Amino acid sequence: MFADATLRDFSARLQGHLLRPFDEHYDDARKVWNAMIDRRPALIVRCANSADVQQAVHFARENNLGAAVRGGGHNVAGNAVCDGGLVIDLSPMKGMQVDPVRRTADAQGGLTLGEFDQQTQSFGLATTLGQISMTGIAGLTLGGGVGWLMGKYGLACDNLLSVEIVTADGELRTASAMENADLFWGVRGGGGNFGAVTSFRFRLYPVGQVLGGKVIHPLSKAKEVLRFHREFTRHCPDELTVYAGILNGPEGQPVVALPICYCGPLEQGEKFVEPLRKYGPPVSDLIGAKSYIELQSGSDALFPPRHQNYWKGSFVPTMSDQVIDRICEYAETKPSPKTLIVVEPLHGAAARVPAAQTAFPHREEQYSVLIMSIWEDVARSEENIAWTRRFWEALQPFATGGVYVNYLGQEGDDRVRAAYGENYGRLVALKNKYDPTNFFRFNQNIGPSKT
């Protein structure tokens, strides 16, 4: 596609590395966590800094290349890579600085949750960032960022103080409440639609040991356990987040688990979770004092890299008996032992933010029901995908119509609109201003207005 001299000149302007399809590390660099994604970009720029990102944007525009932005590469949709275009790979950018006095962290876009937590926890600090340590901070935060601490401290995007972002014109901008405030609103939930965010400044909070772990019940008790979870989560304090999950246990048997995090004083937490630990009783009680890092990495093994992944999610206003019945019905027939069904309550501080305050609009107390189909054998893809779609369709009569954007696959414009609800029009206006040609389109895309 390009003359050697053109690529030599481009490479010479970079402090990072330029990879082409015949280069030694190209195949490793184009792989992402979800093995269903197999795309071959024309070029991969492994960026060393924001200047490299700017160079990559300019080169792509000058050569009419589409550009995908890669942070952690953990997103199920695989938008971190594209066919025939240029990948702006932020994964080498792992610089980070914690200010323990101001309780802030400046973190580059290539960091994972685990890498971020290691540095903040050395000062006894943390912020809301997902539940799986291999996830990249960039994509997670830009889509909203649910996590263990959301009841007490809000979503990841609620704790952003500013970002450094390279927009579609190749300019490096700061976006905060005081500078480019409209753009700052958009990156707090609007995904990668407005540029490549190279650095994030987060607000941090004192978080030491937490009460974490899970209780486990047999699948035969799933209906009763999910009804108990519904009633229990109605009265949880902000410090306590309790999920529900149906999965296969270590010995292969299907179980229903209630994993928790309590981020307040441990003695109070013990009192709050006592009814949960006594209910049933469970066949296994793994709840105890843990480091926050241990909690954040505790479920990593459930999400092995380079497996086939197909997810579908919906918000439901309540875990009605009908929703619970559908979950239990499909749990009995899931085709893969690695598949998970997860119920996440959105509650506390995350649900008290006005819906128009950030691009993330889902601010009432509700539940996200996520079907996470995971399997190894490509020959079984049709079976697993079909089951997931049937299950999701069975839930729709009870759903709000909304969805968390970070859980979307390649599902079309209507589902992207559903992820943003009443905020969608404002996001289109931002796209018109900052990316009118839709240069950043390999994402859950908010297209500019047609002209």
Image (cartoon, rainbow, N blue to C red):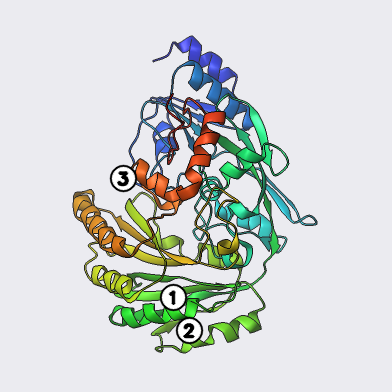
Give the mark nearer the N terminus: 3 vs 2. 3
Q: Secondary structure at mark 2?
A: helix
How far from the left and from the top, in percent, is residue 390? 23, 58
Q: Residues within 10 Å of mark 1 (few under 14, many from 20)?
A: many
User: Which of 343 and 248 lies nearest the eye of the viewer?
Assistant: 343
Query: Which residue in the structure is indicated by mark 2?
Result: 276
Residue 379 locus on image (x, y percent): 19, 49
Q: Quadrant for the C terminus, please.
A: top left
Q: Which residue is mark 3?
A: 36
- Tag 1 residue: 258
Q: Secondary structure under badge 1?
A: strand
Q: Quadrant of residue 25?
A: top left
* Residue 192 shows up from this direction: no
Q: In the image, 53: left or right of 374?
A: right
Q: Nearer the viewer, mark 1 or mark 3?
A: 1
Q: Amino acid at mark 2?
A: Leu
Q: Amino acid at mark 1?
A: Leu
Marks 2,1: beta carbons within 8 A: yes
Q: Nearer the viewer, mark 3 or mark 2?
A: 2
